[in-house]
Structures are given as C-alpha cells and as structure tokens.
C-alpha cells in the first residue's frame, strides 16, 4: 500500500471511534485534549524518557512538570514521573510501600489499608506483590471509617500482630467522586509511622482549583503534601489537566523515596530506572508542560467552575425527572440511583449513550468532563427518561 492508501484505510477505523465532542461519552474520566497538544505531539513523538540522557530536553521538561504540579499540591521539592496513567502510578506507590516494608521486616506480608471505593489498579498491585489489603467499612458519605482504622491499627499494635505498612486515601474516588478525610488519615499515618498514599488521579487537577461555593460541609478538601503524613500522590494530567493520553503522574514527597524504586539498567544513559514501564514517550510530558503554561492557575480554576456548574445543572434537572443522586456532587462526578444499572446502561448504549455503572452502590455514573455541554445533558436525560418508561 502507498501512503495515501494507508491513511485512507486508517480513516475507516477512526470513524468507528466515538468522539468526545459529540457528547455521547459520559462515563470517561478522560476528555478531548487541548488543541495545542497536537503540535506538541508532533514535536516530541520520537522522544524516549526511558533513556533520558539521549533526550535531555524532554527530561528537563519532565522535571519542570513535576515541580509545577508539586507547586499546586503544596510541595516545593517533589520527586516523580509522568507515566502511562493512574494504574501505573498507584502500582508504583504500592511498590514503594512494599519495598520499604521489606527493609524493616523479613518474611512479612505487606499490609495496606484502603477503601472499598479504591481504583481497580490496587487489586492489580495486590496480585502482583501479594499484598494484604484491609478494607474498612464506608460511612454514609462513602468515605473510609476513621474509627475503624484507628481501632484496627491500635489493636494490631497492642497484640504485636500484623503491622500496617501503608494507607491509601482517595481524593475523588472513581465511582462517586468522594474524598476521604486525608487530613485525619495523615495524622494517623504520622502517629504510627505508616506510609500514606493519596490517589488523586482525578481530583488532583480539580480540588486545588475548586471554588469554595462548590465545597460540601461533609468532606475535608485538604488532601495534598501540606499534610505531613502524605508521602506520595497519583495525579493524572490526561484527565482534567487536558493533556493527551498517556500522561499519568506519580509524585513523592522528595527524592529519598527513589531508592525504593530503582533497579539497575547499566546499558542506559541513566544506570537506574524507577518507573514500571521503561520506554516512555516524551509526548505526555511536553504536552502537560504546554497546557499548564497555557492555562495557568486561573485557566484551571475556570475549567473546574465550568464543569461544576454543568454538574449541578445535571443533578438539578435529573431530580426534576425523578432521578436521585446517591450523594450530592463532591466533584464533577454524578451517580444516579438505579434499581438495575447494568440493564439501564445497556439500553442507553443501544441509543448511543455511553455511561458507566458503580460497583459500591446500584447507580449510573456520569462524569461531567469539559467536552460535555448542557445540550448533551438535556438529550441524555431525555434518553434516560425514555429508557425508564419502557
């Protein structure tokens, strides 16, 4: 095939894909990247951060991006990487916890406390590293029960039994957008010398820019490195940061944690590697740098406000039609109660609407990303009403 034929053939496949701007994608935490990233992608498409000495400019950009993200997460001296996504970031954090635990005790099964609402990446980490995961009960706000955590740790300490090596708090859980009380978890972690990881894959580019008028009294919105117990954090620029996939982020409090991740790679320009995926394109790094410079703090504040306005519009209009949210929206994520969410979502899919469902509660899950407009919301609710009538 010649070049023209190849491209024409590929267009046929691309036409099979949904497009964000059509508004039918309502269950994804990703969105249409900012247009500037097309030009940036072309500029950096051949770079490989797996061998950073060959691509010093891309590596310098990564360092700047991590520092820039660290600034709005109240960490002036972070260490980390822009990697494939939240899954790799969370597994990286679990790897650090596991390796730290091994330096303290031999023949010890690493124990981590995390909520039932945690992302599926932690289940992958459990399988890969044979972790012992403890899931406390949830409060009515779908956050971890702090008393249970305190009692569990105190009981184990008193019995000199299974010590807890890590705690995972969620800042914007995948299903509902709920935020665990990271401030109190930080205190618990500090008092007991436990590593606290915060999964803010979604919330990391929302919570710091959220106007106070959108904040609920039932949640603590303090979640970042200003809390001394927080040792690492997952933050994904390819979600609300408007960078293209792949651009996930893992940040640690400082570079002292690198030694728990490094493996030898003597044939590369940097003889140690810490990321799980070795070969990494510089496109995610450069695109994140570009969008962050373009938007600035004010731009992300405006973006968060626009999404939250549309989120509240969705909830208001849904209530008028008799659809009840599981909780008031904490972030731009809405879960609508449904007796049979699997069936409802399949019927909606046949009508061209792609939402998702929750695991922790019977509900339909809608993410109000920047590509979702009020007209899309109105059409979706019309389709949902039609489905429920039949």
Image: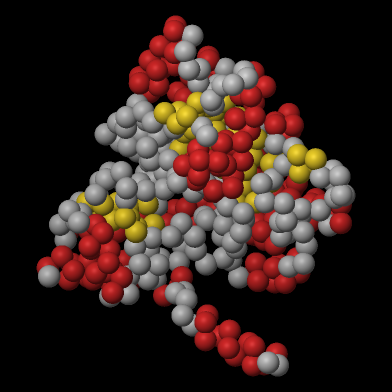
Outermost residue to the front: 107
Q: How many marks?
A: 0
Q: Within the image, what quadrant is residue 24 found in?
A: bottom left
- Please give left or right for residue 355 compared with residue 318 in the image: right
Which quadrant is home to the N terminus?
bottom right
Determine the residue located farthest toward the top in the rendered image.
158
216 vs 318: above or below: above
Q: Position of residue 102 (x, y in %)?
A: 64, 24
On screen, residue 176 above or below 244: above
Q: Residue at x 73, y 29 (%)?
A: 256
Q: Nearer the viewer, residue 99 or 14?
A: 99
**Quarter of the picture holding the C terminus:** bottom left
Q: Could you tell me if residue 315 is visible in this image? A: no
Where is residue 377? Give x, y as percent: 31, 66
Q: Is residue 4 left or right of residue 171?
A: right
Q: Is residue 66 above or below residue 218?
A: below
Q: Position of residue 205 (x, y in %)?
A: 53, 48
């Amino acid at each position: 095939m010649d070049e023209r034929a190849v491209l024409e053939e590929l267009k046929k496949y691309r036409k099979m894909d949904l497009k964000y701007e059509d508004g039918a994608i309502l269950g994804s935490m990703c969105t249409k990247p900012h247009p500037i990233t097309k030009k940036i992608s072309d500029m950096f498409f051949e770079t490989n951060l797996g061998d950073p000495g060959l691509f010093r400019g891309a590596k310098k950009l990564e360092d700047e991006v991590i520092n820039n993200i660290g600034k709005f997460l109240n960490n002036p001296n972070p260490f980390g990487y822009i990697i494939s996504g939240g899954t790799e970031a969370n597994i990286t954090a679990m790897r650090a916890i596991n390796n730290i635990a091994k330096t303290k005790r031999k023949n010890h099964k690493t124990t981590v406390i995390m909520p039932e609402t945690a992302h599926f990446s932690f289940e992958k980490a459990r399988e890969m590293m044979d972790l012992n995961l403890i899931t406390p009960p949830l409060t009515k706000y779908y956050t971890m029960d702090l008393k249970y955590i305190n009692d569990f740790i105190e009981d184990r300490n008193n019995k000199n039994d299974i010590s807890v090596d890590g705690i995972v708090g969620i800042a914007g859980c995948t299903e509902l957008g709920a935020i665990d009380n990271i401030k109190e978890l930080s205190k618990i972690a500090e008092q007991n010398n436990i590593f606290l990881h915060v999964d803010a894959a979604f919330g990391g580019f929302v919570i710091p820019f959220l106007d106070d008028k959108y904040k609920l009294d039932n949640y603590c919105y303090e979640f970042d490195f200003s809390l001394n117990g927080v040792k690492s954090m997952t933050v994904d620029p390819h979600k609300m940061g408007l960078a293209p996939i792949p651009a996930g982020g893992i940040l640690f409090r400082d570079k002292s944690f690198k030694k728990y991740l490094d493996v030898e790679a003597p044939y590369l320009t940097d003889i140690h590697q810490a990321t799980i995926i070795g070969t990494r394109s510089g496109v995610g790094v450069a695109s994140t740098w570009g969008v962050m410079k373009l938007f600035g703090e004010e731009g992300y504040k405006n973006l968060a406000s626009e999404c939250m306005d549309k989120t509240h519009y969705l909830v208001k209009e849904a209530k008028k039609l008799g659809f009840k949210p599981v909780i008031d929206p904490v972030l731009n994520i809405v879960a609508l109660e449904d007796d049979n969410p699997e069936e409802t979502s399949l019927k909606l899919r046949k009508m061209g609407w792609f939402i998702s469902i929750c695991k922790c509660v019977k509900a339909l899950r809608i993410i109000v990303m920047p590509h979702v407009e009020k007209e899309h919301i109105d059409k979706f609710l019309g389709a949902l009403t039609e489905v429920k009538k039949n």
